Amino acid sequence: MEITELSFTRKILLVIFGIFSALTTSGIIFGFQALKSILIENKVYFELCENTEENIEISQCNEQILKFSLMFSLASTASSAFSLPIGFILDKYGPRVSCYIGSILLFFGCLLFGLSSPTFNGYLVGFLLIGVAGPFIFISTLNFSTVFPNKSGLIMAALTGSFDASAAIFLLFNKLFYFFDKKYSIQSFFLVYTIIPIIIFIANSLLMPKTSLQWNNNDNSDDKQNEPNETSNLLNINENDSSMSNNYQSILSEHEQNQNREKDIKEMSSWEQMKTKEYILITLLTSIYMLRLNFYISTTEEQLQTISNDENGIKNTVQFFNIMLPLAGVLSIMPIGWLLDNFKMYITFTVLCSMALLFGILSLIPILPLQFLSILVFVFTRPLLYTSGNDFSTKTFGFKTFGRVYGLMNLISSLVNFGQYAVEYLVVNIFNGQFTEVNIAFTILTTIMFYLPYYLFVKEKKNRNLSIV
């Protein structure tokens, strides 16, 4: 569907719908740290601990923690791995069908989790369905960034910021659980939450276009205002100077060829797009960073416990993390949108890699108060990663093949991401519960990734000159 076919009111409603659905579904599983503390207190999976009856006062054990790690790893991995089949559904049947499926999965995921009890364990499957439902709904809304092309970066930042902010849902459950003095079970919150997929299902029927919105030819360039001036300058050469004229004509020809490369990529088949340097490198960077970030989310408290014995300090730091993770998604919308709409993509990715490296260095310093700064860097790195990756992908590859291209990227990322369970196994069973060796390895990987923006946007500049970079 062309953007011009939509009324201004419907455009606004689509953006609102996209933000609402992202805020309530897309990344709620990443608030797992807040949910896990309630599950532990309710002794979910406590039966896995040895000598349960003799150690009834013990709140958790390694077997239980590994089970929770498996729950989160499966859900977070599936949320990315299912992006490929979701992409095929999106490209073939459109965003409306994709959103319908997502809302149905979310409904049954919340229902399963809400009906779980000591005699019926639906936690793992329910959480898995919730994790898969998120990308079904979220990916179907990414094309909304095209409705106002001059603000596409801001809209993408709002959608991705809402993705990060959705982690607050489980934090809200946590606060309500203790506010009502544990009167209502965590299962009851999930049962009440089934109203959200019902709302999304209805809104999807009323607002969602049947086919993805497409970029207009002249709307996807960050530097489109500068291009006519550059071309005009090349044409305004004294034609009497034949040698200079020939040189500039050659430069102009090369300039025009490079400008067409972005359009050429959009016209490629999905398989051809997947073989480009742009696709390979953005997938590699996203995969490594996603593993790093998700591993920290699932082990925040355990990592803090290895650097301090101050229980109150650790509790306060974890609480700070649980609050800032979703809040940063909201606070980062404007600055990330400004960054994407006003600077070349090379600057954005350089900022991203710098922040990731800084986080890696800070996480290696065993000083608890310093981890507040580490968390601050982390929570703002995460939305920048997802927003810049999404923005680059939509503008480079377009929406004609977006489902498959984006889906495979997330599938690859998910396969790498599943390594977090293996990494935590190493920490628990090989490194005696210490995270130093793992964090050093991650920091080295982050340093290597720092080279990718340079390679992607600078070293290859002579061979291609994408207007968006």
Image (cartoon, rainbow, N blue to C red):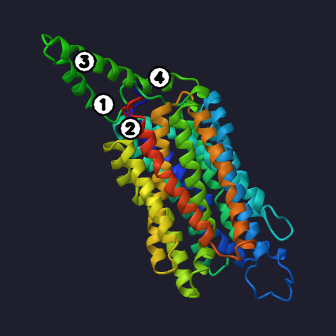
Question: Alpha carbon of mark 2 to alpha carbon of mark 1: how far?
Answer: 12 Å
Residue 262, compared with residue 362, is above or below; it is above
Question: Alpha carbon of mark 4 to alpha carbon of mark 3: how far?
Answer: 25 Å
* Residue assigned mark 3: 247
Q: Residue at x 38, y 51 (%)?
A: 336
The answer to which of marks 4 and 2 sits earlier in the sequence is 4
Q: Position of residue 350 (x, y in %)?
A: 40, 51
Counting the numbered discs, the total is 4
Q: Residue at x 19, y 17 (%)?
A: 244
> Residue 469 — which label?
2
- Which label lies toward us, 4 or 3? 3
> Residue 224 — which label?
1
Q: Is residue 381 left or right of residue 106?
A: left
**Mark 1 surroundings: few (<14), some (14-19) or many (≥20) residues within 10 A:** few
Q: Disc 4 marks which amino acid? A: Asp
Residue 342, compared with residue 4, is above or below; it is below
The answer to which of marks 3 and 1 sits earlier in the sequence is 1
